Amino acid sequence: MADGTDYFLILNLLHRYSDAVDRGDFARVGEMFAHADVYFPGEETPSVKAGGDFDFGDALAQWTRRYPDTGNPKTRHYCTNAIIDFDDDTHARCQSYFLVVQATDELPLQPIISGSYVDRLEKVGGEWRFTERRELIGQTGDLSAHLLQTFEGPTGE
């Protein structure tokens, strides 16, 4: 079975996703999820298919406001409470919580959305990568400074 190093490599992958989103580096997000099907909240079929022409980074770029003075969404994504289960040496499942906070010139620092990620991962060539992500929304706050579109998805996981 996988060893303790694999646990930390998967944690780093989760945190690299948060870092890329907070930096507004959606191309990097697309690369991280190039081999993954991504299900948006409440969906039974993936909005983003592995290897497709439209990747997860493209989707985030359509939804997420980036501010001209910083080039990023002025957010911090916190990914916590990771529960990682290894199916074998090269396959794992991970459930984690997320909390996004944001502050802009008009919006004081506040939580804007929370929920869970349910991920599947595989290890290829010694590197862990996402193969599936499902996002479950818990609670939402004021998303007006964060999203370019109105969020009307399911909440209350």
Image (cartoon, grey):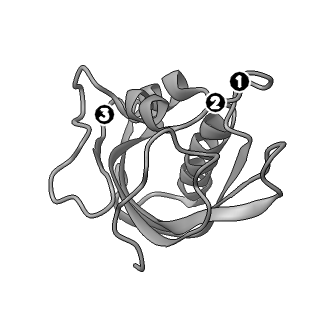
Badge 1 or badge 3: first in the primary sequence: 3
Residues at marks 2 and 3, CA–CA distance in whole angstroms: 25 Å
Residues at marks 1 and 3, CA–CA distance in whole angstroms: 26 Å
Q: Name the residue at 67% across, 37% down.
A: 73
Residue bearing the label numbered 3: 35
Quarter occupied by residue 109:
bottom right
In this view of the protein, which residue sits in the foreground, 129 or 145? 145
The type of residue carrying mark 3 is His
What is the crowding at mark 3: few (fewer than 14 residues within 10 Å), some, or many (at least 20)? some
Please identify the quadrant where the N terminus is shown: bottom left
Quarter occupied by residue 16:
top right
Badge 2 or badge 1: first in the primary sequence: 2
Residue 104 image point, x, y percent:
79, 44
Q: Secondary structure at mark 2?
A: loop
Is there any visible trace of residue 24 in the rendered image?
A: yes
Task: Please identify the residue farthest to the front as the structure is shown.
Answer: 106
In this view of the protein, which residue sits in the foreground, 72 or 127? 72
The type of residue carrying mark 1 is Gly
Residue 57 image point, x, y percent:
44, 30
Is there any visible trace of residue 97 in the rendered image?
A: no
Q: Name the residue at 62% across, 61% down.
A: 142
Residues at marks 2 and 1, CA–CA distance in whole angstroms: 5 Å
Eye-nearest disc, 2 or 3: 2
Eye-nearest disc, 1 or 3: 1
Please identify the quadrant where the C terminus is shown: bottom left
In this view of the protein, which residue sits in the foreground, 79 or 130? 79
Asked whether the beta carbons under mark 2 and mark 1 sit within 8 Å of each other, the answer is yes
Residue bearing the label numbered 1: 71
Residue bearing the label numbered 2: 66
The type of residue carrying mark 2 is Arg
